[in-house]
Image (cartoon, grey):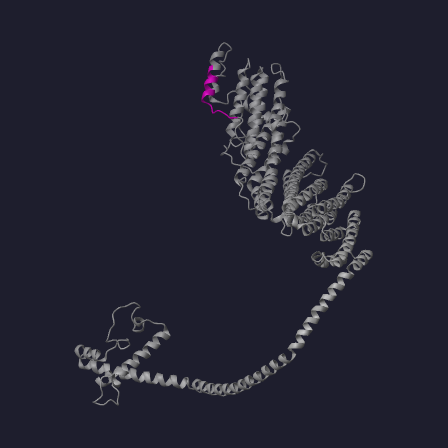
C-alpha cells in the first residue's frame, strides 16, 4: 500500500540520489496539472476543489497541486484503523484502474485523428519542397529579365532624350499655331453663334497673351482678340436683354459674360430684373384666372398651375443665381431673399384669395390635395431660399385654412342641428290624418340623435384628411398638436356640444305668456336629448375624437365629466321649463274658468264643469307624452280608497267644527283663526321644487302649478251656496283622476282640501252638498 501511495518508479535503484526519478515524477505531475489548469482557466485553489482566493494549501489533498504522499500516508496511519486502511487501498487501486481505462479510451477514440494529422504533415512537407524549387526558378528568371531591361534602357537612353525634346517643341508649335489662329477662330465662332466655344478659346489664351504682351506679335494678337471679345460681349448682352429665351439660356448668357470679365454687380441686377419680369407674367396669368368673367378653375388645377409656373420659375431663378453669383457673398444672398420674399408674398395673396372661394364648399378632399401640392411645391424654394422663409409662410397659410375649415364644419353642425329642430317642429305641427299617426316623440328623438351623430362623424372624417400620413404638412407641430386638441376636440366637438346647449337654453330664456312659439313637446325632446348626451353620447364622441386625433399637445382640454355636467344641467332646465309651460297652459284654463263665472248667482250643480274634464284630458295627454321619453319613476304607497274619497267642507276633522250647523256670520274671527292655526300645522308644499328625470316628477310639478293657480284664483272670488257646491263637485272630479299621476296622492288631497276650504271661507252661506250626491254627479260626468 505504501508503494502504491508513494508511487515510486519501478526502475529506481537503491543508489539513486534525491535528484533522480523520484524527484522528477512530482515535477512532471505538477507541470501536467498546471497545463490542465491553464486549459480550463482555473486558479490553483479552484483546481484543488477549493474556492478561488483560498490561502490554505492542503498537502493531503490527492487532487491538489501541493499533494505530499508522505504526509498523506502518515495521516492515514495515525488516524485510520487497519480495516479503513485496507478499504482505502482497495478504493485507490480501483481509481487507478478507472483512470487507465479512461486513458486507453481516449487514445482509441482519437487514433484516427492522430493518423490523419500525421498524413497531413507529411503532405505539407512534400508540397513545400516543390514550392521551394519553383521559387528558386522564378528568382533566376527575374534576374535574367532585370539584366535584359538594364541593357535595353542603356541602349535607348540617347534616343529617348531626343524624342522628349521633339515632343516639347511640337507642343509649343501647336500652342503658337493656336494663338496665331485665335482671332480667326473667335470671329468664326461669333458669326456661327457658338458663343460658348469662343469664350473657352479666349479663356485658354488669356493668360499666355497677358504674360507675353510685351512682344509685338503677341501684342497684336491680344488687341485683335480684345476687339472680337468686345463684340462678343455686346452680342451676349443684347441677347440677354431681349428676354425672349428661357431662364436656362439667360443664365448661360450671364455665365459667359462673367467669364469674359463683365462686372458681376451689374449683371446681378439685370438678371434679377429679367427674372422679375417673367415671374410677374406668371402672377398676372394666375390673377386673370381669379377674375369675375372667366370661370375660375378648381383649386387643385389652380395650385398646379401656380406650382409649375411661378414656383418652378422661382426655383430656376434661385438655382441659377446661386451658381452664377456665389462670389457675391451674404449681400448677394440677401438680395435674392428680398426678391423672392416680395414675389412670394404676391403669390401667397393670390393663393389665399383662391382658397377663400373654397370655404363654402363641403368637399375637403380636393382642398386638402390642393394644399398638399401647394405645400410640397414650396419646399424646394424654401430650402434654396432659407432667408425668404417661403416654406414657413406656406405652412402658416395651410394652418389658417385648416382653422377656417374647422369653423366651417362647426357652423355646418350648428345649421344641421337647427335643421333637425325645424323638422321636429314641422312634424309636431303637421295635421294628423284619419287613420294615420305621425311619428312619435321617441322616433323623432332617435332621428335627431342619429342625424346629429352622423353629421359629427362626417365632420371628423372631413377634418381628419388634414392629418393623413400621405399629406406633406401633417407632420408639422400644429397638425400633430394644437390642431387635434384645441382645434378638433375643443373647437369643433366641444364647441358644438356647448352650442347645442346654448340653443336649447334660448328656448328657456324668453318663454312669453304662453311659452312663446316653442312647442312643449320640443322642450321635452331636447331635454331627453341632452340627458342622453350626458349619459353616453358625449363620452362616445370624445373617445372617438381622441382615437382619431392622437395629438401631442399638452394644452388643457375640457374634461368629459365637466361637459356631461353641463349637458345634465341643461336637460334639467329644459325639463323644468317644460313643467312650467305645461303648468301655465292648464293654469290659464283654470284661471279663466274661475274669473269668468258668477259664483254668487250660479245654479245648483248638476254636472262637472267642462274645463275640469279638459284639465284631466290634457293631464292624461301630458302623461302619455312624457311616458314616451322618460321612465315611470317612484310613487309612494297608495291608499286603497284613493278614488273613493269625497271632498266636502267636512272632509277634514279639523274643519268640522268650523263648518258645523251652528256656524253664524257673527264669528268670522274664530273661523279665520282656526284656518290659520291649521295652516301652521299642515305640511308646506313647494310648488316649484326641482324636477327629476322621470314621468311622475314631471306630472307632479305640472299638477302642483295647476292646483296652486286654482287655489289662488278661488281666494280672489266670493262664492254663493251653489258656487261652493260646484267647487266641491269639481275638486272631487279632479281628485278621482289626478291622484294617479303624482308621486304622493296626499299632495293632491291637501291642495284640493285647501281649494274647497278657501271657497268655503269666502261663502256667506257655506252649505255643502251631500257626499253621495257629489259622487253621483262625478260618476255621471
Principal secondary structure, stretch drawn in magenta: helix
Look at the picture and state if 212 lies above or below 759: below
Who is closer to the viewer here, 430 or 387? 387
Is 442 situated left or right of 667 in this image?
right
Q: Position of residue 290 (x, y in %)?
A: 76, 41
- Look at 64% across and 34% down and name the residue there: 522
Looking at the image, can residue 775 be seen? no
Q: Nearer the viewer, residue 626 or 12?
A: 12
Residue 637 location (% of width, % of height): 49, 34
Is residue 486 shown above or below 655? below
User: Residue 20's image quarter?
Assistant: bottom left
Highlighted range, magenta = 673-686
- Can the viewer see residue 383 in this picture? yes
Which corner quadrant holds the C terminus? top right
**How many discs mark residues in the rendered view?**
0
Viewed as shown, does residue 88 lie left or right of 238? Answer: left
Q: Nearer the viewer, residue 518 or 88?
A: 88
Q: Is 53 included in the stretch rendered in magenta?
A: no
Amino acid at each position: 500500500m505504501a508503494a502504491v501511495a508513494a508511487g515510486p518508479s519501478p526502475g529506481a535503484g537503491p543508489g539513486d540520489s534525491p535528484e533522480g526519478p523520484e524527484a522528477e515524477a512530482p515535477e512532471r505531475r505538477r507541470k501536467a496539472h498546471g497545463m490542465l489548469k491553464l486549459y480550463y482557466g482555473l486558479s490553483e485553489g479552484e483546481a484543488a476543489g477549493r474556492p478561488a482566493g483560498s490561502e490554505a494549501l492542503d498537502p493531503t489533498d490527492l487532487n491538489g497541486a501541493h499533494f505530499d504522499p508522505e504526509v498523506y500516508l502518515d495521516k492515514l496511519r495515525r488516524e485510520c484503523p487497519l480495516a479503513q486502511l485496507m478499504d482505502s487501498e482497495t478504493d485507490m487501486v480501483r481509481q487507478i484502474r478507472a483512470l487507465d481505462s479512461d486513458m486507453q479510451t481516449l487514445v482509441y477514440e482519437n487514433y484516427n485523428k492522430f493518423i490523419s494529422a500525421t498524413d497531413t504533415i507529411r503532405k505539407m512537407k512534400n508540397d513545400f519542397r516543390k514550392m521551394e524549387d519553383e521559387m528558386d526558378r522564378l528568382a533566376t528568371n527575374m534576374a535574367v529579365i532585370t539584366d535584359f531591361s538594364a541593357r535595353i534602357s542603356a541602349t535607348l537612353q540617347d534616343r529617348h532624350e531626343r524624342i522628349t525634346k521633339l515632343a516639347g517643341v511640337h507642343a509649343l508649335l501647336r500652342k503658337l499655331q493656336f494663338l496665331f489662329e485665335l482671332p480667326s477662330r473667335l470671329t468664326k465662332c461669333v458669326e456661327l453663334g457658338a458663343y460658348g466655344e469662343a469664350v473657352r478659346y479666349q479663356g485658354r489664351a488669356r493668360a499666355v497673351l497677358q504674360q507675353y504682351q510685351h512682344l509685338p506679335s503677341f501684342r497684336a494678337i491680344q488687341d485683335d482678340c480684345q476687339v472680337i471679345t468686345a463684340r462678343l460681349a455686346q452680342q451676349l448682352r443684347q441677347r440677354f436683354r431681349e428676354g425672349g429665351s428661357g431662364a436656362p439660356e439667360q443664365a448661360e448668357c450671364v455665365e459667359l459674360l462673367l467669364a469674359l470679365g463683365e462686372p458681376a454687380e451689374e449683371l446681378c441686377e439685370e438678371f434679377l430684373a429679367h427674372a422679375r419680369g417673367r415671374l410677374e407674367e406668371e402672377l398676372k396669368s394666375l390673377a386673370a384666372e381669379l377674375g369675375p368673367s372667366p370661370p375660375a378653375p378648381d383649386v387643385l388645377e389652380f395650385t398646379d398651375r401656380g406650382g409649375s409656373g411661378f414656383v418652378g420659375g422661382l426655383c430656376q431663378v434661385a438655382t441659377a443665381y446661386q451658381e452664377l453669383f456665389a462670389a457675391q457673398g451674404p449681400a448677394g444672398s440677401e438680395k435674392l431673399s428680398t426678391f423672392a420674399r416680395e414675389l412670394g408674398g404676391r403669390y401667397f395673396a393670390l393663393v389665399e384669395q383662391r382658397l377663400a372661394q373654397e370655404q363654402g364648399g363641403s368637399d375637403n378632399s380636393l382642398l386638402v390635395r390642393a394644399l398638399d401640392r401647394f405645400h410640397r411645391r414650396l419646399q424646394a424654394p424654401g430650402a434654396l431660399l432659407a432667408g425668404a422663409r417661403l416654406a414657413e409662410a406656406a405652412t402658416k397659410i395651410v394652418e389658417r385654412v385648416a382653422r377656417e375649415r374647422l369653423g366651417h364644419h362647426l357652423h355646418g353642425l350648428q345649421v344641421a342641428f337647427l335643421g333637425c329642430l325645424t323638422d321636429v317642429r314641422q312634424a309636431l305641427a303637421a295635421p294628423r290624418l284619419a287613420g294615420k299617426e305621425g311619428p312619435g316623440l321617441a322616433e323623432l328623438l332617435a332621428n335627431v340623435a342619429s342625424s346629429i351623430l352622423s353629421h359629427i362623424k362626417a365632420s371628423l372624417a372631413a377634418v381628419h384628411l388634414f392629418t393623413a400620413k400621405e399629406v406633406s404638412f401633417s407632420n408639422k407641430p400644429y397638425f400633430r398638436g394644437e390642431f387635434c386638441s384645441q382645434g378638433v376636440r375643443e373647437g369643433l366637438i366641444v364647441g358644438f356640444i356647448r352650442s347645442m346647449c346654448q340653443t336649447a337654453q334660448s328656448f328657456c330664456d324668453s318663454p312669453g305668456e304662453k311659452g312663446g312659439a316653442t312647442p312643449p313637446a320640443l322642450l321635452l325632446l331636447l331635454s331627453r336629448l341632452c340627458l342622453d348626451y350626458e349619459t353616453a353620447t358625449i363620452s362616445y364622441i370624445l373617445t372617438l375624437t381622441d382615437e382619431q386625433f392622437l395629438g401631442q399637445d399638452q394644452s388643457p382640454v375640457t374634461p368629459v365629466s365637466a361637459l356631461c355636467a353641463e349637458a345634465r344641467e341643461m336637460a334639467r332646465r329644459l325639463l323644468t321649463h317644460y313643467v312650467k309651460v305645461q303648468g301655465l297652459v292648464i293654469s290659464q284654463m283654470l284661471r279663466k274658468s274661475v274669473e269668468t263665472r258668477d259664483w254668487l248667482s250660479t245654479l245648483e250643480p248638476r254636472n262637472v264643469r267642462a274645463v275640469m274634464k279638459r284639465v284631466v284630458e290634457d293631464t292624461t295627454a301630458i302623461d302619455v307624452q312624457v311616458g314616451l321619453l322618460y321612465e315611470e319613476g317612484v310613487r309612494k304607497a297608495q291608499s286603497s280608497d284613493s278614488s273613493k274619497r269625497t271632498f266636502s267642507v267636512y272632509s277634514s276633522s279639523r274643519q268640522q267644527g268650523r263648518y258645523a250647523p251652528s256656524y253664524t256670520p257673527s264669528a268670522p274671527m274664530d273661523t279665520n283663526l282656526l284656518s290659520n292655526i291649521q295652516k301652521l300645522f299642515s305640511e308646506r308644499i313647494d310648488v316649484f321644487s326641482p324636477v327629476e328625470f322621470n314621468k311622475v316628477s314631471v306630472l307632479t310639478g305640472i299638477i302642483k302649478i295647476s292646483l296652486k293657480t286654482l287655489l289662488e284664483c278661488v281666494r280672489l272670488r266670493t262664492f254663493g251656496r251653489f258656487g261652493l257646491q260646484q267647487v266641491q263637485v269639481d275638486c272631487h272630479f279632479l281628485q278621482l283622476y289626478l291622484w294617479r299621476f303624482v308621486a304622493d296622492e296626499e299632495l293632491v288631497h291637501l291642495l284640493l282640501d285647501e281649494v274647497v276650504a278657501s271657497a268655503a271661507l269666502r261663502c256667506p252661506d257655506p252649505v255643502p252638498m251631500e257626499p253621495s250626491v257629489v259622487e253621483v254627479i262625478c260618476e255621471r260626468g
